[in-house]
Image (tube, rainbow, N blue to C red):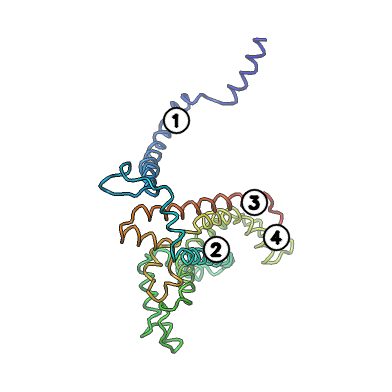
C-alpha cells in the first residue's frame, strides 16, 4: 500500500519539475528583473483603484475617502437620467463603431498592396508618407484640420470653390473625425502587418506561382493566414476600447454648433470632473464606461477564440 502511494506521488513531483524555491534560486536574476515591473504595476495601477469607491460616495476633499457620505448608486442613476445621456451614448458608439469599420480593414489592405510592390524606392517613399502622420501629435493634427477646413482660405474650400465652415456642421463631424483618424493611425497598423508579412517564406510564393495560383489566390491563401493572428489581436483590442473615443481630438474639434455629433462620454467626464470639480459623479461615469469596455472585451475575446479554431475559410 505504501509502495503504491509513493509511486503515485513520484510522478506528481516529477511532473511539477523543480520546486519553486529551487527555480527562483537558479534564475534569481530573471525573477529580480520581473519584480520591478510587477511592483510598479501594483503601485501605479492597482493601488489607485482604491479611489474608485468615490463613485459610490459624495466625495469631499476635506473629509477624505472614508469620511465622505456613502450614496450607493446615486451618481449612476443621475447619469442615466441626464438629458444628454442617450445622445452621448449614441455619439460615442457611432464614432467608435465607424472608426472600427473603416479603420480596421484599411491598414490590412494597404499592407497587402505594399507587400506586392517591387519598386523599392517607390515603396520606401510610400511607407514614409503613410507612417509619418502617426508620429504627429493630436494637437498638431487638429490644428492642421482647422486650417484645411477653414471657410476662409482652407484647402478644401479652395478646391471646392466654397466657403463652408465644416466644423460647425454636425453632419460633417463624424466624417472629419474618422477620416483624420484613419490618416493618422493607419500607418501604425501598416507597420505591424508589414513586419508580419516580412516573415513569410518566399518559397511559398514561388511554389504557388508554379502551381498556377493568381495574385489574389496567393494573398488569400498565404498572406491573410499569416496576418490572421495579428488581425484577431487588433480586433480584440479595438473592440475592447469601443467606448474610449479619443478625448483630445473631440475636445479640440468640438464647437457649440457640432455638439449634436461631438458630445461624447469622455468629454463629459472631463467637463464634470475637471471643470466643475464633481469628482464622485465623473468617477461614476468613467467607471460605467470602463465596465462596458470590459464586457465588450470579454465578449469579443470569446468570439475570436471560437473563430480562430476554424480557419478553413482561408
- Name above or below for residue 223 compared with residue 263: above
Kindly report the distance in space between the C-alpha atoms of the residues bearing marks 3 and 4.
24 Å
Q: Which mark is residue 101?
A: none
Q: Which residue is mark 2?
A: 104
Q: Are marks 3 and 1 in contact (CB under 8 Å)?
A: no
Q: Earlier in the sequence, mark 4 or mark 2?
A: 2
Q: Earlier in the sequence, mark 3 or mark 2?
A: 2
Percent x, y of residue 278:
33, 56
Q: Which residue is mark 3?
A: 308
Q: Which residue is mark 1?
A: 27
Q: Report crowding for label 4: few under 14, some 14 to 19, many 20 or more residues within 10 A (C-alpha).
A: some
Q: Are marks 2 and 1 in contact (CB under 8 Å)?
A: no
Percent x, y of residue 167:
41, 77
- Asked which secondary structure carries label 4, the reply is helix
Percent x, y of residue 303:
62, 52
Residue at left offset 40%, top offset 42%: 46
Q: Nearer the viewer, residue 283 or 102?
A: 283
Q: In the rendered image, which quarter is residue 196 located in?
A: bottom right
Looking at the rendered image, the disc whose residue lies closer to the viewer, 3 or 1, is: 3
- Asked which secondary structure carries label 2, the reply is loop
The N terminus - image quarter: top right
Residue at left offset 58%, top offset 67%: 113
Q: Nearer the viewer, residue 104 or 46?
A: 46
Q: Which mark is residue 208?
A: 4
Looking at the rendered image, the disc whose residue lies closer to the viewer, 4 or 1, is: 1
Q: Report crowding for label 2: few under 14, some 14 to 19, many 20 or more residues within 10 A (C-alpha).
A: some
Picture mark count? 4
Kindly report the distance in space between the C-alpha atoms of the residues bearing marks 3 and 2.
18 Å
Q: Earlier in the sequence, mark 2 or mark 1?
A: 1
Q: In the rendered image, which quarter is residue 141 located in?
A: bottom left
Q: Report crowding for label 3: few under 14, some 14 to 19, many 20 or more residues within 10 A (C-alpha).
A: few
Amino acid at each position: 500500500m505504501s509502495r503504491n502511494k509513493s509511486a503515485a506521488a513520484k510522478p506528481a513531483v516529477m511532473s511539477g519539475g523543480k520546486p519553486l524555491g529551487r527555480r527562483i534560486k537558479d534564475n534569481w536574476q530573471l525573477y529580480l528583473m520581473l519584480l520591478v515591473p510587477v511592483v510598479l504595476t501594483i503601485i501605479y495601477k492597482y493601488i489607485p483603484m482604491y479611489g474608485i469607491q468615490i463613485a459610490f460616495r459624495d466625495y469631499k476633499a476635506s473629509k477624505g475617502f472614508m469620511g465622505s457620505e456613502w450614496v450607493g448608486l446615486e451618481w449612476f442613476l443621475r447619469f442615466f437620467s441626464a438629458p444628454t445621456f442617450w445622445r452621448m451614448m449614441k455619439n460615442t458608439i457611432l464614432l467608435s463603431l465607424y472608426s472600427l469599420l473603416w479603420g480596421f480593414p484599411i491598414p490590412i489592405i494597404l499592407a497587402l498592396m505594399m507587400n506586392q510592390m517591387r519598386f523599392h524606392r517607390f515603396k520606401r517613399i510610400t511607407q514614409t508618407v503613410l507612417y509619418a502622420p502617426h508620429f504627429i501629435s493630436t494637437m498638431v493634427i487638429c490644428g492642421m484640420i482647422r486650417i484645411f477646413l477653414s471657410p476662409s482660405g482652407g484647402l478644401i474650400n479652395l478646391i471646392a470653390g466654397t466657403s463652408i465652415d465644416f466644423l460647425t456642421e454636425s453632419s460633417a463631424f463624424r466624417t472629419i473625425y474618422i477620416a483624420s483618424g484613419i490618416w493618422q493611425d493607419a500607418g501604425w497598423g501598416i507597420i505591424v502587418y508589414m513586419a508580419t508579412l516580412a516573415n513569410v517564406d518566399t518559397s511559398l510564393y514561388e511554389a504557388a506561382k508554379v502551381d498556377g495560383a493568381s495574385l489574389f489566390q496567393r494573398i488569400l491563401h498565404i498572406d491573410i493566414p499569416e496576418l490572421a493572428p495579428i488581425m484577431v489581436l487588433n480586433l480584440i483590442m479595438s473592440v475592447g476600447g469601443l467606448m474610449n473615443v479619443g478625448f483630445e481630438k473631440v475636445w479640440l474639434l468640438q464647437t457649440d454648433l457640432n455638439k449634436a455629433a461631438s458630445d461624447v462620454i469622455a468629454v463629459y467626464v472631463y467637463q464634470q470632473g475637471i471643470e466643475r470639480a464633481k469628482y464622485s459623479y465623473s468617477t461614476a461615469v468613467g467607471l460605467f464606461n470602463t465596465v462596458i469596455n470590459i464586457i465588450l472585451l470579454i465578449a469579443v475575446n470569446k468570439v475570436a477564440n471560437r473563430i480562430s479554431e476554424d480557419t478553413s475559410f482561408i
